[in-house]
Image (spheres, coloured by chain):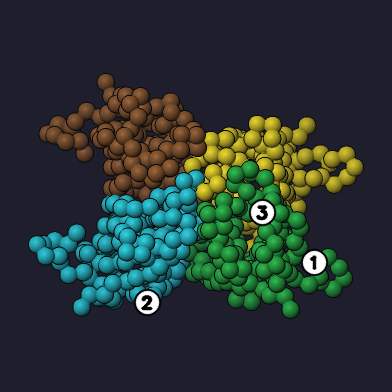
Chain colours: A brown, B cyan, C yellow, D green
Amino acid sequence: MSKVFTVEYPILFSHCDPAGIVYFPRFFDLLHRAMEDWFTFGLEERFADFVMEQRLGIPTVSTQVDFMGPARFGDSLKIELRVLKLGRTSIELAIDSFIGAQPCFKAKHTVCVFSQATFKAIPIPDDLRARMETYLSPPQRGGVPA
Amino acid sequence: MSKVFTVEYPILFSHCDPAGIVYFPRFFDLLHRAMEDWFTFGLEERFADFVMEQRLGIPTVSTQVDFMGPARFGDSLKIELRVLKLGRTSIELAIDSFIGAQPCFKAKHTVCVFSQATFKAIPIPDDLRARMETYLSPPQRGGVPA
Amino acid sequence: MSKVFTVEYPILFSHCDPAGIVYFPRFFDLLHRAMEDWFTFGLEERFADFVMEQRLGIPTVSTQVDFMGPARFGDSLKIELRVLKLGRTSIELAIDSFIGAQPCFKAKHTVCVFSQATFKAIPIPDDLRARMETYLSPPQRGGVPA
Amino acid sequence: MSKVFTVEYPILFSHCDPAGIVYFPRFFDLLHRAMEDWFTFGLEERFADFVMEQRLGIPTVSTQVDFMGPARFGDSLKIELRVLKLGRTSIELAIDSFIGAQPCFKAKHTVCVFSQATFKAIPIPDDLRARMETYLSPPQRGGVPA
């Protein structure tokens, strides 16, 4: 049984643009926050320690996002995070968001684990990989996920 | 001859994360700024008037970005913007960035023109479309662009 | 008995600078969020409706902030909000923050109520004023508050 | 003759809130950028090297800001920076901004020089102090500056 990590964040004044909807770069702040909370609460790997103590990081390799509907000031954005694929150093995530039942953005977001000392990608630590695997989404019907 | 819109922005303290490199959502602020400057200086369609007077906007339909190398505090980020495709309401852009000769991010970024009154996409105004066409990138060898 | 509105927010990766501490302009995002939450949860005046439906706003008149200690990535910032003075159109707030028992910033922050239609300050609506008065801090011993 | 450091920045889409005016925390991003540019271009002390090579920083000690008028999307914000006082470790700045001839915000902003290694304030390096002194504003008639 694969797990889905789910969080919900309020759309704040600071997220919104002169049209009263979320200025799209702020969605990436919320997407990043979902990854932070997934580490800390989902994987039980406190993300602040991962960065500040272990001197690791998760720079973005690539992101592919479809924006289906706007989010307005005062909305509540629900975010669902799944693991699509675990490479040696990389993590491919599906990060989908909703306002109520309405899809907001759907992202396929790939990061790698890197060392702040060398600025090079490093293998995902084994114990972390094991915990990430519990969020691995089963392949969709017909083949490769997403 | 197709034009390329080129700008260069400094990487500021506020763009950078605890690892001293650009926190990736800030790249989208810079990408958005490149689109604003393209409107105002490239297309000679002042973007502030487009939004505040004409009550139009360019919400993101989708974005697909590869991050090739980090940008560090103090770097200068060069951004090149081309038009890949003009739909009836949508604009597909190639937005590539560099630190010196080193690629930083490469985006295929699609927006549409919408009305703030109806929150619906509207056809790209004819005169604006004509000016955008001068930035239309010729199809790459072998077929469809990007 | 005067009330104090208290909230607590996590210090996220996006708040922090290359030294690993909160980049000070982000403290104002958190201060603003505390005001939003005070409206919505403390005053039971949903701030999103106040801005988007009633077309009102609370622009800053002045702010005076002492920064006593840094906040680090992973810290939890506790914010306490009190009303120091209610003018005809203006609201003077004391907004103090702490990391555990350690003071972080202490602000005297004054906003006014304004109409988005006229961009002019307007009198604080009576029913809102009544609810704000319950957060009015008693004058400190020796005179003027703060 | 005391120097004034002057810069001008465009008000971008990302600075503005649902009322179409600058969301006040973004003014602090612009104020910070003015300090960065003052270091790099005014003092000829490249701020990125100051932070990333020398591992120093300029955390805020206190700020006091009056907001006189809004800045709107598309405006150009002129910022003037003067030194009011140089302490052993601290720097008190007057940072005033204008839209055309119209005052926008006026700040008295105090930072200190600190070491990222110890997180303690350190004396302003002598050569830097000498260059800062050229921006020292003469005391106003009647006494204390600002």
Please state which of the two labelled residues, at mark 1 or mark 2, is closer to the viewer: 1
Residue B139, label in figure: none
> In which quarter of the view is residue C76 placed?
top right
Q: Going by the picture, which residue comes out furthest to the front?
A: D126
Asked if residue A101 can be seen in this view, the reply is: no
Please name the residue shown 40% across and 68% down the image: B8
Indicate whether B73 appears above or below D6: above
Which element is circle 1 on? loop
**Left or right: residue A91 compared with residue C125:** left
- In depth, the one of B139 and B134 nearer the eye is B139
Which residue position is annotated with label 2? Answer: B44
Q: Earlier in the sequence, mark 1 or mark 3?
A: 3
| Front position among marks 1 and 3 | 3
Task: Pick the quarter of the image with the C terminus of chain A.
Answer: top left
- Residue A94 left/right relative to B28: left
Q: Amino acid at mark 2?
A: Glu
Badges 1 and 3, same chain: yes
Side of C138 where C65 appears, left or right: left
The N terminus of chain A sits in image quarter: top left
Label 1 vs label 3: CA separation?
21 Å
Q: Numbered disc 1: what chain?
A: D
Q: Amino acid at mark 1?
A: Pro
Mark 3 to mark 2: distance in Å? 44 Å
Identify residue for label 1: D145
Please tell me whether mark 2 sits on a helix, a strand or a loop. loop
